[in-house]
Image (cartoon, rainbow, N blue to C red):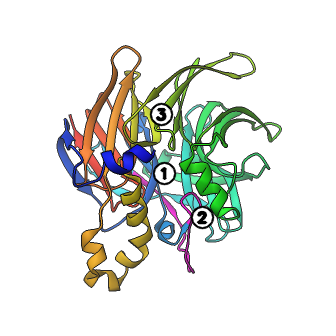
Amino acid sequence: MLSLFWNNALNRLERVNTLQSLDIKFADQIRNCEDALLVEEHGLAILGCDPARERWNTVMGIFLPGPYPRGSVWVYDYASGSDSLTELELVGYEGDDLHPLGMAYDSSSSTLYMANHRTDGSRLDLFDLDFKGGRAVAKHRRFIKHPLIHTPNSIAVINNREIYVTNDHYFAIGQHGILARIETYAAIPGGNVIHVDLATDTARVLARIPFANGIELLNDTTLAVSSTSSSSISIFEIEPKAHNLTLTNTFKVPFMPDNLSVDKNGALLIAGHPHPPSLTKFAETRALCNSEEGNTAEVCRATSAGSWISDWTAEGGRRDLYVGTLYPSSCTALRDVERKTGIVTGLYGKGILVWKE
């Protein structure tokens, strides 16, 4: 990670753009959308957004005084031509303490999974997602709290009874600030991948990874996990019955990888952050810069954060798609191959970035 401080400073970062028709959408409606997923059979993208992340970030350690606005989930219709954005109604979810991070969707059971970084402790929330009637609705089913789910970041669905979850740190930064930062910058493997049995609400650790972040199934027998602090992607073979993991490959990337996704061609999309100091400064100034006082603050005009999007296949290796600052703090990249449409969300970005191929 430390090499990125010099190599990827924004004033010397080599820009790359292989994408066409870049367009930032909904910048006046949503911001801070950490994760997103595609429901391609409906031509929809589900976006998890949290304006409170400017004051309440349990991963980076930003804890400013409240209030902390409730986060929300949005549905973007990217396929029908309407180009519409509507807030997903969360039926039965009690209170305003909702701060979505990683999400996953199981189409076989119509279940939406969410890593929810509430102010009273992180947990997993499960929703029944219904697309009938022309308007998506999510009914809150239940939540899961477990000692091993203490810093949940991303989720991957195995089947309707089992999921994988990453914990990004062993030391939660809210309780152990110095130790959590040492864990990050020294790339100590305190993060992990856990297996969660939804029938029994039991969990077990399968692998330990420095700053385990994004997680995605490449196929039924292969799992990819990003390690943010070691700037690498780990590839695991999945044991069929117990779903245990065996490390088969690790490859480096020239940025801090965040979330992962897989398109229908089997390519792994990797979104991340080129320059750690720029991201930290950008994150720490968002509370000011998104307030009325920020309109005249010099730091808000001078501060930016880079984005880096790559894809990877076992056969072709890694390919850079976009490197730049047009849209800041990329953390998720999605691609609908058939519709030739891609979507990028930003940890602290306003709106989303949409591209056409």
Measured as percent of width and height from the top left, residue 90 is found at 57, 59
Q: Look at the magenta stretch and give its main secondary structure.
A: loop
Give the CA separation, mark 2 to mark 3: 30 Å
**Position of 313 relative to 45 (above/below):** above
Measured as percent of width and height from the top left, residue 313 is found at 38, 21
Measured as percent of width and height from the top left, residue 38 is found at 42, 39
Question: Which range of residues does the magenta coloring cover?
Answer: 57-75
SS class, disc 1 = loop
- Quarter in which the C terminus is drawn: top left
From the image, tell me which residue sits under label 1.
136
From the image, tell me which residue sits under label 2.
98
Residue type at mark 1? Ala
Q: Is 58 covered by the magenta stretch?
A: yes
From the image, tell me which residue sits under label 3.
232
SS class, disc 2 = loop
Residue type at mark 3? Ser
Pointer 3 or 1: first along the chain = 1
Q: Image point 40% across, 72% down: which residue?
A: 285
Q: In which quarter of the image is residue 67?
A: bottom right
